Image (cartoon, grey):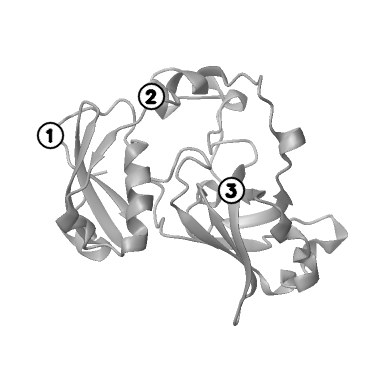
Amino acid sequence: MGEAGNGSVFVPIARIQNGFSGKFGIPRQSGMVDGVVSRVVFEPGYRDPNAFRGLSEYSHIWLLWEFSENRGKAWSPTVKPPRLGGNTRIGVFATRSPFRPNPIGLSCVRLVDVREEKGCGTVLLVAGADLMDGTPIYDVKPYLAYTDSHQDARGGFADRVREHRLNVHFPVELQKILKEEYVPAVCGILAGDPRPAYQSDEERVYGVEYAGYDIRFRVAGSELTVCEVVQAGDARKRGSVR
């Protein structure tokens, strides 16, 4: 059994596997890009099939995880949300900023499949995750619509910026460079506009890494155009603008 069995120590029970090798381009919230499919692979001490009994009856689950890239970094009582242009300060507890007293993340994802994989035991296939590849997961809980969903809830400043979307123009010849299964995920990531709100230079080329590829694009107004797709390793050698 894992070390956390006595309730006094928190250790990762799983890690996520997907195409996000870096933070830039990861959806700002879970569920925004359903085309992003990830695998939740459990550590050896947590692969007892009995632990997953009944889980497949749920359509969605909660993932509790760690902003591991921010481990050891200082937190601030106020942060500057990118969607507000990076100039307006908001209290950290009114945001989902990764720079928190305890770097804990919470994501609701769609449960696509619960399956057995050789060498990995029970693996969860989930859609809509907003986690970087390799992120440690500390718990999995079922999503319960009757208690977790509140139709009259207010979303603060997030409600005012959530409708921001870009029209994505992705030439067919560039789409063919990717595996066909990656195209919906990439289009969803780009439509969500991965740029910080304070960047609006129409001549600037941005690059999002996903599944080993660097997808380069420009944005003019509400129109995003993919201009190049290259292997991520080649992109790093040549220099990719974020």
Query: Who is closer to the viewer here, 127 or 10?
Result: 127
Q: Can residue 211 be spotted in the picture?
A: no
Q: Earlier in the sequence, mark 3 or mark 2?
A: 2
Query: Who is closer to the viewer here, 181 or 41?
Result: 181
Query: In front: mark 1 or mark 2?
Result: 1
Residue bearing mark 1: 203
> Disc 2 residue type?
Gly
Circle 1 packing at 10 Å, graded few (<14), some (14-19), many (20+), is: few
Residue bearing mark 3: 109
* Residue found at x 75% / y 64%: 52
Q: Can residue 138 be spotted in the picture?
A: yes
* Residue found at x 31% / y 62%: 180
Q: Are marks 3 and 1 in contact (CB under 8 Å)?
A: no
Query: Who is closer to the viewer here, 130 or 171?
Result: 171
Q: Secondary structure at mark 3?
A: strand
Query: Who is closer to the viewer here, 212 or 225?
Result: 225
Residue bearing mark 2: 86
Residue lying farthest to the bottom in this orientation = 118
Q: Secondary structure at mark 1?
A: loop
> Disc 3 residue type?
Val
Instruction: Name the image quarter holding the C terminus.
Output: top left
